[in-house]
Amino acid sequence: MKRKYLLQAALLLSGLLCTPFSTAANAQEHGAHTHGEADVLIILESTSLFITLESPAVNLLGFEHAPHTNKQKQLAKEVVAKLQKAEHFFAITPACVLKNNSVDFPFELENTSTHHVSTNGNHTSKEHHHDVSLNVEWQCKRTKKLEIDIKIFEEFKGFNSITAQWIAFDRQNAAKLNKHNSVVILEPAQ
């Protein structure tokens, strides 16, 4: 419950304070999205670090429709399995302990693992744009300065850029990330 409240508050703040990015966030909310792009929201609250990645399914799967063939179904299961290992996509220095990891996937999957995977599958033929959400929580012992390397570009070639927004140390900031510039640094103002 605390995590959900923090994420909602952060989204509200980011919408109010980051005007250039709020337009993209509003478009994403209303179903518009851009292939190759994604959004990451990072919140540091005391020793808890929350990261949410929102991406069009095509960036991860290569397609956005519900998987039809056995090959597509297998690929979807493999993508969810990879996303459930968030430590492979977010390298945090100094290291933090992974506490919670959930994947919101737009299609029904059979035989999912014990990790939380929720599906919001709407299988109408009119729905062609589907998004995937990855929500992760870490516990950090040292938070004076955290470096977060977003390594998802290495695993999934469908990503061209990620709009990152973060709230930490009573400030907020944003940056456009890509495979050559993928690190977010959280540190107090000097």
Image: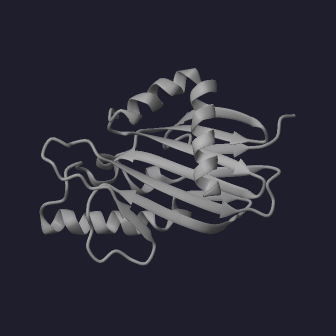
Q: Kindly identify the residue that appears in the image at 83 percent across and 35 percent down.
A: 189
Residue sitting nearer the eye, 139 or 162: 139
In the rendered image, which quarter is residue 47 located in?
bottom right
**In this rendering, does residue 173 appear at all?**
yes
User: Vertical placement of 160 versus 58: above or below?
Assistant: above
Count of marks, rendered view: 0
Image side of residue 76 versus residue 178, left or right: left
Image side of residue 165 versus residue 132, left or right: right
Q: Residue furthest right?
A: 190
**In this rendering, does residue 174 appear at all?**
no
Query: In what quadrant of the picture does the C terminus appear?
Result: top right
The location of residue 133, given as percent across then percent down, is 43, 52
Residue sitting nearer the eye, 118 or 160: 118
In the rendered image, which quarter is residue 76 located in?
bottom left
The location of residue 46, given as percent across then percent down, is 78, 53
User: Vertical placement of 9 versus 69: above or below?
Assistant: above
Query: In what quadrant of the picture does the N terminus appear?
Result: bottom right
In the rendered image, which quarter is residue 82 located in?
bottom left
The location of residue 43, given as percent across then percent down, is 66, 47
User: Vertical placement of 56 versus 142: above or below?
Assistant: above
The location of residue 48, given as percent across then percent down, is 71, 58
